[in-house]
Every structure is written in C-alpha cells, then in structure tokens.
Image (tube, rainbow, N blue to C red):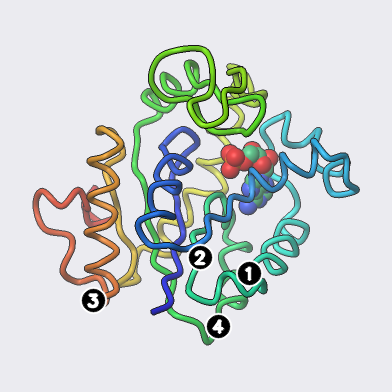
Amino acid sequence: MELNLVMLGPPGAGKGTQARQLRRAFDIPHISTGAMLRDAVQAGTPLGREVGAIMESGGLIDDEVITRVVTERLAHPDTSGGFLLDGYPRTIRQAEALDRIVAGRAPLVIIDIVLTEAEVIRRLASRMVCAECGTNATGEGDVCHDCGGPLVPRADDREQVVVNRLEVYRNQTEPLVRYYGGRSTYCRIDGARLPDDVTADIVRAVESATRDGGQGGSGPGSGIRDPETS
Ligand code: AMP
C-alpha cells in the first residue's frame, strides 16, 4: 500500500531524526529537500550555485525552483510505494503544488511535530552534524556514529540565522497548519520528548490515519492534539 508522508515542524523539531527512523519502519524513501540542496551546493551544480547564499542566510529558496526539484524526485520509480517528504512543503504555494503533484496517488499523511520556540533555540544551539555524511550527531563523542567523520556545527545554525529561520517558519510555514489542519490525515505530535517516544507516537498516528482516515489516533496519551484546541 502506498504511504505518502509529509513532515512538518520548526527547524530542530526532530524531522530529520524521525524521518530516518520512519524510513526504516515503513520502508519508503526519505526525501529531504534541505539535504538535496546541501548536496547541490557541495557539488557546485548550477542549482547549488543559485541557492547557496540564500540557504546560508536562513531564507527560503524560490517556490518554483524547489517544486521542480521535488517534482523530478517524486517521479522516480522508488516512490511507487510511497515517500517521506522532509522540508517540503514550506509555503502555501508549495503545498498547493504538492497537492497537484500527488493528485491520483494515495492521500498525504501529514505529521506535524510541535515544539516551543524556546526549545527550538536550545536544541539548535547545541546541534552538531557530520561534516562527511550530514547526519545529525547523537549521543557522546566527537565523531559520527554512522561513518566516523568529524562533527561540526551546521552552517545555518548560527544564532542570527536561527532567528531568521524561525521567523521564516512562523510567517511562511506555520500557515500550513491551517492548510492541512482540517484533513483527517493531519496528525499533531508532541516533539518535546525522547526521540523513540516521538517515533512510537508517529507510527501509531500513521497507522490510525491510514486505517480509518485519521479519526482514531487523537485520544489522550496518543501525543496527538486537535489543531483547534492547542
Ligand atoms: P532544512 O535542512 O530542511 O532545514 O533546509 C535547509 C535550507 O534549505 C532552508 O533553510 C532553505 O534555505 C532551504 N530549503 C529546504 N527546503 C526548502 C523548501 N521546501 N523551500 C524553500 N527553501 C528550502
């Protein structure tokens, strides 16, 4: 059965960390637009040269440019059983474009990971990523658990850039909560807990959303809250 997941949530909410777990749990490709763009910057492609400075500043790249990248990626046959989008959509125009791209496919299941701004800032200030493979560092030590590469702060986690990214999130991306909030496959997840607990909540919410159109997963203790009441 096709499973088309979209991860929402502010920077630092744990979208990337959760996406890596969910990719394994559901056996669908993890498509991170941020990672694709960082690869393009590193490889010096025309796309990378176009977007590098915007990414460094914490701004968003053009809707049409990123939508073209995502359209091409979702046409790849490895998404026939579904996909997990991380970092797209980030604006209402992107969300509208995504609805057009997936028309006729299984409905989008939206996972919105909720975290306060204070917690976002605290997390991003201490986030380290692997300079070799880009994985977020977890646990102790100063080398990557996956590939042994050196750990460095992410270029766009500097304080002023974090402030910009949060403002961009508030202005451009948070309106997506209203865009998707009325759908039965929209799931709000409390991100301020241990990663494994968040993963378990997401898996439960996805199973519920795909089983009965999302009506069954928002009870007490499920980690999912009604967008109207929270
Ligand atoms: P991320 O790793 O998802 O935080 O993305 C890192 C940066 O890539 C963002 O701050 C943006 O500059 C750019 N980016 C990633 N996805 C998008 C998108 N859907 N729309 C516009 N810019 C994006």
The residues tagged by marks 2 and 3 sit, at their Cα atoms, a distance apart of 18 Å
Residue position marked by numbered label 2 in the rendering: 83
In this orientation, which residue lies closer to the viewer: 227 or 130?
A: 130
In this orientation, which residue lies closer to the viewer: 36 or 150?
A: 150
Precedes in sequence: disc 2 or disc 3: 2
- Please name which of the two marks, 4 or 3, marks the residue nearer to the observer: 3
The residues tagged by marks 1 and 4 sit, at their Cα atoms, a distance apart of 12 Å
The residues tagged by marks 4 and 3 sit, at their Cα atoms, a distance apart of 20 Å
Precedes in sequence: disc 1 or disc 4: 1
Secondary structure beneath disc 4? loop
Q: Residue at x 79, y 44 (%)?
A: 40
Ligand 1 image-quadrant field: top right
Precedes in sequence: disc 2 or disc 1: 1
Residue position marked by numbered label 4 in the rendering: 103
Q: Which disc, if any, is residue 211? A: 3
**Ligand 1 near label 2 (Cβ, under 8 Å)?**
no
Label 1 packing within 10 angstroms: few (<14), some (14-19), many (20+): some
Task: Assess whether mark 3 and mark 1 are in contact (beta carbons under 8 angstroms).
Answer: no
Question: In terms of image quadrants, where is residue 192?
Answer: top left
Q: Position of residue 49 (x, y in %)?
A: 88, 41
Residue 123 is left or right of residue 222, and the answer is right
Residue position marked by numbered label 1 in the rendering: 74
Label 2 packing within 10 angstroms: few (<14), some (14-19), many (20+): many
Precedes in sequence: disc 4 or disc 2: 2
